[in-house]
Amino acid sequence: MRVAPSGPAILLSALVALLLVGVGWFVRNEDSFPPNSLPWKPVALDAPPNWIAHWQMARLKDDRAACRVALATASRLRFEPLKDRAMGEACGFDNVVRADAGPVVFAPRVTATCAMQAALYWYQDQLAAPALAHMRSPLVRITQFGTFSCRNVNNEQDGRRSEHAAANAIDIAAFHFADGRNVSVLRDYGKDTAQGRFLAAARQEACRVFNTVLGPEYNRLHANHFHLDMGRYRICS
């Protein structure tokens, strides 16, 4: 005697069939998804970061070749890879590149890990909209205090090494605009002005792509700059 399928069995078969149809549709149409929206696709630095931006940057940190490809395909970036080298105890360069040109001029030029350069490229593009919205002028230059420094966190004598010890961080002090105005973290952060609102937006955009973002609200040591890094800890402060 043949036993008719039960209700749960029929429902399970229907769900499996729907799942297979969905997977088939997805495979056929995955190229129509926006860049940076599927985690297994290459990172597209000329397209805006999406919801998987932090995951993509972590992948670039761990995959030297993929990171170099991402930088090489960024249309407005010129860079020079530097040799790996140790510089003191737990300090040195590993997969570091010097950016010679990008969407915005950095003064001085940035030498940092490949993943940091990738995040900075995204960051420069993401600043274009708040620059026009708040300052009514394009952003043309960024003043930075440096990326590499063989030291501990907060310059403490003891403790863990700073991400600066591996050129995996940058300290940004000021933003300069095409109309000649500039915005200083020390002078303008937290103010209800166009400059202050731009800095608030710049901090928020940084949190979308960097793992750690520290500014004046974090402690007095960051009163005059935004610290951005690609370290292990996810902080937006």
Image: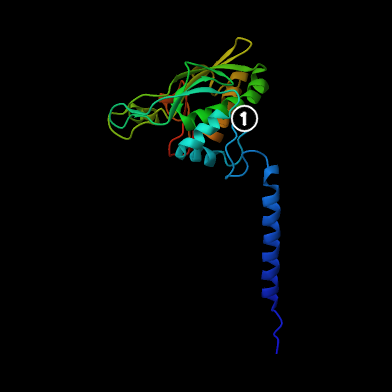
- The amino acid type of the residue labelled 1 equals Asp
| Residue pictured at 63% horizontal, 21% vertical | 131
Location of residue 230 with respect to 190 vertically, above or below: below
Which residue is rendered at x = 58% and y = 28% of the image? 74
What residue does disc 1 label?
46
Q: Nearer the viewer, residue 208 or 184?
A: 208
Q: Secondary structure at mark 1?
A: loop
Q: Examine the rendered structure and indicate whether residue 84 appears above or below residue 105.
A: below
Does residue 138 appear in the picture of this structure? Answer: yes
Whole-percent x, y for residue 219 in the image: 42, 28
Residue in the foreground of this view, choosing between 51 and 173 = 51
Image quadrant in which the N terminus is located: bottom right
Mark yes or no: residue 207 visible. Answer: no
Report x, y in % for residue 78.
Answer: 54, 21
Label 1 CA crowd tier, 10 Å (few <14, some 14–19, many 20+):
some
Task: State the image coordinates of residue 65 (x, y, percent, origin top left).
Answer: 48, 36
